[in-house]
Image (cartoon, rainbow, N blue to C red):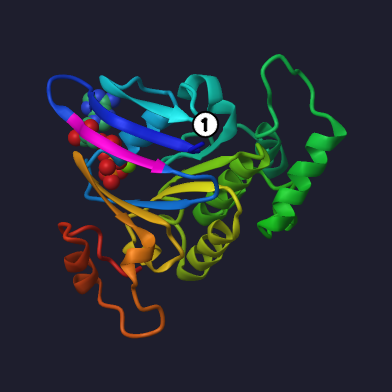
Amino acid sequence: MNALEVKHLYFKYENDWVLEDINFSLKDKEFMAIIGPNGGGKTTLLKIILGFLKPTKGEVLIYNKNPLENRHLIGYVPQYTNFSLDVPITVFDIVLQGRIKKGKFFYSKEDKKIALETLERLNLLEFKDRKIKDLSGGQRQKVLIARALATNPKILIMDEPTSAIDMKGQKEILNLIESLKITRVVVSHDIKILLRKVDKIAYIHKKAVVHEGPKLNIPKDVHFCEIELIDFLKVENVGTDTK
Ligand SMILES: Nc1ncnc2c1ncn2[C@@H]1O[C@H](COP(=O)(O)OP(=O)(O)OP(=O)(O)O)[C@@H](O)[C@H]1O
Ligand SMILES: [Mg+2]
């Protein structure tokens, strides 16, 4: 059974198609990178996969079910974080939120243990009792990743997880994502993500061009030219900034 299936998906907010005939599937533990220009429809696609938006036509299946039915299997790190920095919530509390379940009103010892282990895994333990407002942007981003992982998801969906993060932090996060043995979908403007062990690449600009990883054969250690890569993928210019 596929972890994720997108079949003849079309979507429009108002009059114009934002997504047109998107098709791909991901097996368990596969890693897909999604690239594409601003306004191309990447975040919209993720929101449909998460069940926040309904397809105008076509369908999305999460382990063969409607996204709303299997939403609990997905951990999500949104593109923009809009939690209020005025609320004096700690890093630990944010990660614990990943353990919230419907109809459950308290956290168990197990929940707290998982939250602590996740913080440790992301080297965030030292910030555990820090208010979220007293962290840097990159550290906050890592806390959100920790919260998504604390849900123990089968599928992890991340929208620009490294956009506010320095080179060292980016590498750390990409190493972590690469090492996870779950299905991953990562939207990124930084096409260096394609140098990672991705199984599939989708270039989304209203329509999708999907590349299968093994055929990519991008040399890892030699000269890497983003322009050549873009040419190879037969896509338009995506963010080629080498932050
Ligand atoms: N709530 C909305 N109502 C109407 N149009 C919207 C809405 N949200 C997004 N759009 C439009 O849909 C298109 C796709 O937007 P989306 O956010 O999915 O792009 P994106 O690929 O994630 O872009 P970016 O790389 O800038 O994050 C854009 O033209 C955008 O203006
Ligand atoms: Mg977006």
Residue 51 screen position, x and y as percent: 43, 24
Ligand 1 - quadrant of the structure image: top left
Q: Position of residue 116 (x, y in %)?
A: 77, 47
Query: Which image quadrant is residue 92 in?
Result: top right
Most extreme residue toward the front is 1
Mark 1 closeness class: few <14, some 14–19, many ≥20 residues within 10 Å? some
Left or right relative to 180: residue 9: left
* The stretch drawn in magenta includes residue 87: no
Task: Using the image as rendered, state which of residue 165 and residue 103 is in the foreground.
Answer: 103
Residue positioned 66% across, 32% down in the render: 97
Task: Tell me the chief SS of the magenta region.
Answer: strand
Q: Amino acid at mark 1?
A: Tyr
Instruction: Report x, y in % for residue 143.
Output: 60, 47
- Identify the residue at horizontal 19%, vertical 33% (top origin): 20
* The C terminus, quarter of image: bottom left
Q: Position of residue 163 (x, y in %)?
A: 40, 55
Part of the protein shown in magenta: 18-25
Residue occupying image coordinates x 54% and y 45%: 28
Element type at mark 1: loop
Left or right side of 36 for 236 = left
According to the image, label 1 marks what residue? 63
Q: Nearer the viewer, residue 24 or 96?
A: 24
